[in-house]
Amino acid sequence: MKKKKKSKRLNRLKIWFLIVLFPAAVVLTTLFIVVFYLFNPITVVNTLKETPQQLFEIEFPEENIPLYQEAANEYGIPWTLLAAHHRIETKFSTMDPLLSPVGAEGHLQFMPCTFVGWTHPTCSGKGQGQIPESEKTDPEVIAKYGGYGVDGNGDGVADPYNLSDALYSAANYLSKNGAADGDLERAIFQYNHSDKYVKDILHYYRLYEEQFQKQ
């Protein structure tokens, strides 16, 4: 009888272990592994080396390379610089809408007065202006007021919402502000007066140089 009682106790202990202790042991082991990984100095250092751009990267649209090259070659700047601007400005045109809260328009985010020209009579302040829609995309109006907008695809319209036109316009702007002479930092800063912006553009420019120019 004693042996049977002892056997029943052992069986109960085994069942209790399987139901309670074993799952608890698995949970504790998992927590230990997670904590060790998170606070392992090597893991922390490697994570810190990664920039936010690397952690949340967007797939590069290789089908756009001919468009980048065409516009960049026209104005004597690196096409990888143009691609970097496209990445930073609208995440390769994945932003919806392609209109910023401050009024920057299109694939490469031009303020209307920069696109049409600051000598336009309605332009002042931050550059939104009160430019009629019919004038915003008219190459003759843009030429008259000294804007950077360009009819890149030759359809008679310079439209910041057309990717080819937007890329030609951005290439035009960067070229005239130093990029054609190799002064990339000045050109980038003129595009957006922010040191962080310059740093971000140069990050992608160098990344694309390394990734594509060696192919």
Image (cartoon, grey):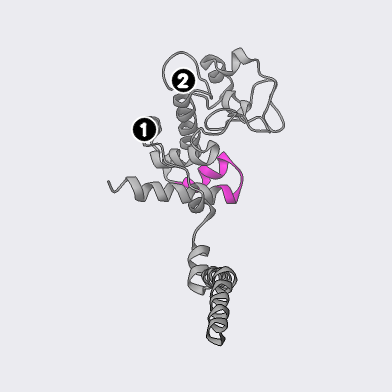
Q: Please report the residue visible at 57 percent of the width from the left and 32 percent of the height from the top.
A: 109
Location of residue 134 with respect to 37 vertically, above or below: above
Residue at numbered disc 2: 151
Q: What residue type is labelled 1?
A: Glu
The image position of residue 157, as x and y in percent, is 49, 15
The image position of residue 140, as x and y in percent, is 53, 14
Quadrant where the N terminus is found in the figure = bottom right
Is residue 68 one of those drawn in magenta?
no
Q: Nearer the viewer, residue 50 or 140?
A: 50
In the picture, the disc for residue 98 is none
Q: Which element type, helix, strand or loop, lies under badge 2?
A: loop
In this picture, which residue range is highlighted in magenta? Answer: 183-197
Where residue 20 sits, quadrant-wise, is bottom right
Evaluate whether residue 78 shows in this view: no
Residue at numbered disc 1: 63
Is residue 195 one of those drawn in magenta?
yes
Where residue 96 sits, quadrant-wise, is top right
Q: What residue type is labelled 2?
A: Asp
Q: Nearer the viewer, residue 162 or 113?
A: 162
